[in-house]
Amino acid sequence: MKGKMKIFLMALFCAFALVSLFPLISSAQTIAGKEIRVGAALCISGHGANVGKREAIGAQAAVDAINAEGGVYGVPLKLYIEDTASNPQEAVNVVRKLVADHKILAIVGPHYSSEAEATFPLGNHLKIVQICVASSKPGLSAANRPYAFRNTLTEDKIAGAVVKAFKKRYNIKKVAIITDIKDAVSKSVGTGVLPAAFKTEGIEVITGTDPVTFQTNDTQFTAQITKLKAMNPDGVGMGALGPDALNIITEARRQGMTQPFMSTAPIMEGEVPQLGGKAVEGTFSGTIWDRSDDSPKSKKFKAAYDKAVRIYPGEYTRLPDYYAVNAYDAVFMIVEAIQKKGVTNRPGDLEKDRTKVMEYFTTLRDFKGVASKGFNEVGDGVKDVQVYEIKGAQWIAVKK
Amino acid sequence: MSVYLEGVLALMGINILMALSVYAILTTDQLSLGNAGFMAIGAYVSSYLTVKSGVPLLPAILVAALASSIVGLLIGIPALRVKGIYLVMATLGFGEMVRTFFMNFEPTGGAYGFRGPSGATLPLIYGWVLVTIFLFWLLTRSRLGRSLDAVRDDPEVASTVGLHVTLLKIGVFGLGAFIAGVAGALYAHYMFYIESNNFNFLVSAMAVLFVILGGMQTFWGAVVGAIIFSILPEALRFMKDWRLSLYGAVLVSMMIFRPSGILTRETVRNLGERFTGIFRTTRS
Amino acid sequence: MLGSTYSLIAMGYTLVLGVLQMLNIAHGDVFMFGAFLGLTLAFLGMPLYWAILLAMLGAGIISILVERFCFRPLRKAHFLGPLLSTIAFGILLQNVATQIWGSEPSRYPQTTEIAQFQLGPILISSFHIIILATSLFLMIVIDQFVKRTRMGRAMRATSENQTNASLLGVDIFRVFTFTFFASGALAGVAGVLTALVYLQITPFIGIRQGLIGMVAMVIGGLGNLRGAMIGGIMIGVMEVMNDAYFSAGYRDMIIFGIFFLFLMFKPEGLFGTTERQS
C-alpha cells in the first residue's frame, strides 16, 4: 500500500500545515469592521465649554495621530463627540447614546465630578469603560469599580509634593487655610487634603478644623483676608479654583499680607500668573503637566493638538491644558487595550470587547503616555507630580 | 429598546411629573416657581431611607412624597397672604432656601452630594406618571375639580357658594408638593447620585415653562409641554455648541407665537370628540 | 463692593416692575452682557469713561430687545408669560455669551494702587467709594428724572394705569422702551464697574447677581428706587458680616430666608412700595 500511504501522509501533512498556519491567517484579520469607534462625553456647552472643547480636541488629536500611522491594524479610529452641556442629566443621556446608538468601545469623559457621580454607576450597569479626564473628587472611582476610571491624579498626591516643596522654600512652620465650601473638590482640598498634608510635614495648622470660608465665584474677600491676616501665619493654604485663588491673593496683597500662598492642581487653570501680576509671584502649586513642558512626547502632543484644533477653533481652545493631555493619553490607552487584549471589533463581540478594555485598564500600571502611567487599584490615575511656582508671570517647574 | 431611548423617556417621565406638580397648584391660580424645592425634599428623604436605612424603594418614595407634601401644606398657609408676583417671588425664595439648606446639611452629604440611590426603572417611573395622569383625569370629572375651577375663576363667588377656598388653596400646595416629591425620589433613584445643585431655580422654571408652553388650561397641556420640551434638547444635538442658545430662542419664539400654549381647552375638547368619534363609528 | 452692584441691579429691576408690574428675569444676564461689553472695549484700549458709556448703551439696547421679544408680544397672554419668556431669554443670553467670550472667567488685568480704610471687619477701598458714589449719583438722576421730566411723568402715569395713560395721550410703548433702556443701562454700569474693578466674569454671573438684586428690591420696597439702593447696600453689608463671623455656606440661606419673610410679612418693604397688591 505504498502509494496510498503516501497520499495519506501528504493529506495529513497538509492538514497539519493548515492547522498550524490558521492562527497566523486569523490574526492578520484580528480587527474587523471599517472603523473602531471611541466615544467622548464632554462639555461642549455650558460652564465647562472651554475645557470640554479642549479635551475633545485632545482626544481628536490622538485619533488623528493614530490614524496617520495606519490606525489599528489598518483600521481607522473614529471619535464620536457628544455634548454633556456641563450637566449630569445630559451626561447620562449622552453616555446612553454613545453606548446604544454609536456602539463605541469605551468613553473618554465626562469632565465634572457631578457628571461622573451619575454616569459612573450607569457605566457599571451598561458595562462600558469611562475615563474621566478631570474629576478629582476623592473616592469617586473607588465607589464605582470596575468600569470607572479617572485619568487624573487625586489632590492628596499633588498636595503632598507641593506642601513639601513649599515648606522647604519658605521655611513654613505654621499655616492658615482658606477654603471654598461650595465646590466639592476645593472643599475637600481645604478641609481634608491640605490639613493632612501639612500635618505629615509637621506644620501647625492655625485654623485647625475651622478654616476661613468663602463660596465659589464670590465677589469680595475683604472679611476673609482680614481674618487671615490677624492669624499671622507663615503661609496660607487654599482650597480654591483658579479665579477665586487669584482674587484671594490680590485682596491679601491689598490688605498688606506678604505671606506666600499655595494650593493644588485647580489653581493652575484660570491664567493666574498672567492676570495676577506681582501679587501672585511665588505662589506654589502642582499638577501633572503644564504647557511649558517640552519633552519629546509633549512636543508630539502639542503638534497633534494644533492640527486638531480645527474641530472647535477659537481663542479659548488654541492652547492645550493638562486636561487635554489626559484625554489624549486616554485614547492611546484605549488603543493599547484593543491591541493587547485582542479586541475583535466584530458587532457580535461588542460586549466582550468593552469588557476586555476594562480588564486591561484594571492592571495598567506602566503606560508610557505624555503624562499618564495608567491606573491604580481603585481606578484613579497614576502619574508623576510636578511642583510649580509662579515666576515672571508664568508657572515655572520647581526643581526637586 | 435602545438604552438611549430608555434614558430620554425616563427623564421625560420625571419632567411630566414636575410639570403636573406645577399644574396642580396652578389650578387655584397660584403660580409656584419653587417646586424644585419640593423635588429636593422628595429626592433626599427617599435616598436617605433607601441607602442609609434599607427601606425598600416604593415605601421610601411614599414617605418622601408625604414629607414633601407636609412642607407643601406649610408653605400653602403663608402663601394665602400673597398674590401674583409676590407669590411667585416667595416660592422662588422657598426653592432657593431648600437648595442652600441641602448644600449645607452634612447628614445627606452637603456639598459632596449623596451617592447610592438606585432602582428607578422605566416601568416604575411611568407607573407613577400614569397614576398621576389618571388622578388628574378623575379630578376634571369630579366635583372637586369643578370647585377648583371656581376658585380659580372667581374666588369671591366660590366662597359665597360655600366652597372652602382656603382649604383648597392650601390643599393644592400639598398635592403639588407630593407629586414633585415623587418626581424627586424617582430622579434620585434613576441618576444614582444627587446634589443640591440638581434642584436649582432653573429646574423650577423649566417645570413652569412646560405647563405654560404646553397649555395651562388643561392638565394635558402640562403633559404635552413636558414631552415636547424634554425631546427638544436631544433633537437639537446637531446644532453642537449652539444647541442651548437655540433652545432658549425656541422657547422665546413659542411664547410669542402661541402664548396660550399648545393645547387649549378647545383643542383638547376637539381632540377628545374626534377620539371618541372613532370609537362610535367603529362600533356602529 | 458692599452691595453697590446689588443696588444698581435692584434699581433696574424696580424701574421695570414699577412701570410694567412685571419681573424681568433676564435682567441679571443683561448685567452680565454689560460686563463683557465693557471688558471687550477696555481690552480694545478704550479709556474707562468711554467703556462705561458704550457698555451702558449696549446693555440698554439688549434690554430693549428683551422688551420687544418677551413683553410686547405677550401683552394679551397670561400675566406671567413675560416673566417666563425672560427666563428663556436669559438662557439664550448666557449661551450666546459663552459662544462669544468662552465659559472661563475673563478679567481686566490691571489693578492700580488705591487708598483703603478699615471699618471693623470691613475694608473699604477707594473703588468701593467710586461705585457707591456712582450708584448714588445714578439714583438721584433717575429719581429726579421720574419726578420732573415729561417722560418721567409719562412713566408714572403708565405705572398707575396703562389704559388711562394711553387715553390721556401718553405713548405707552415709548415709555416701555425707555424704561427698559434705562433699566438695562443701570445693569450695564453695574456690570462694567464689576468687570473693571473687581470680579472675574463668566457668562453665568448674572444668575446669582440677578437673584440677589431681586431680594434687594423686595427689601427696599417694590417700585421704590431709594429702597432698592438701600436694600442692595444692606445685603452687601450682611454678606460681609456673615463671612466675617460665620461660615460662607449660610449666606444664601440667610438672604433667601429674609427674602421669604419680607414677602410674607412685610411685602411693602422697608420703604414702601408703589405697587398695588392686585
Image: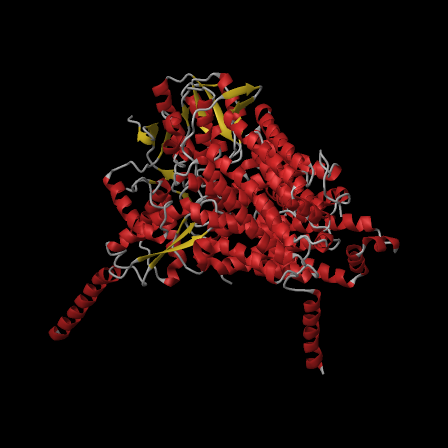
State the image coordinates of residue A92 (x, y, percent, origin top left): 50, 51
Q: Which residue lies furthest to the left in this view?
A: A2
**Along the line of sight, the residue nearer the viewer: A50 or C249:** A50
Q: In which quarter of the image is the C terminus of chain B?
A: bottom right
From where the camera sits, is residue B114 visible? no
Q: Is residue A205 above or below residue B193?
A: above
Q: Which residue is drawn at 25% across and 54% down?
A: A68
Colour pattern: secondary structure
Q: Residue furthest bottom?
A: B284
- Quadrant of the image occupied by residue A2: bottom left
State the image coordinates of residue A343 (x, y, percent, origin top left): 33, 55
State the image coordinates of residue A39 (x, y, percent, origin top left): 39, 54
- Quadrant of the image occupied by residue C72: bottom right
From where the camera sits, is residue C72 visible? yes
State the image coordinates of residue A273 (x, y, percent, origin top left): 37, 31
**Along the line of sight, the residue nearer the viewer: B10 or A225:** A225
Q: Is residue C212 above or below residue B20?
A: above
**Along the line of sight, the residue nearer the viewer: C147 or C65:** C147
Q: Residue at x 28, y 26 (%)?
A: A399
- Quadrant of the image occupied by residue A193: top left
Q: Is residue A157 above or below residue B187?
A: above
Q: In this view, does A254 lie to the left or right of A34?
A: right
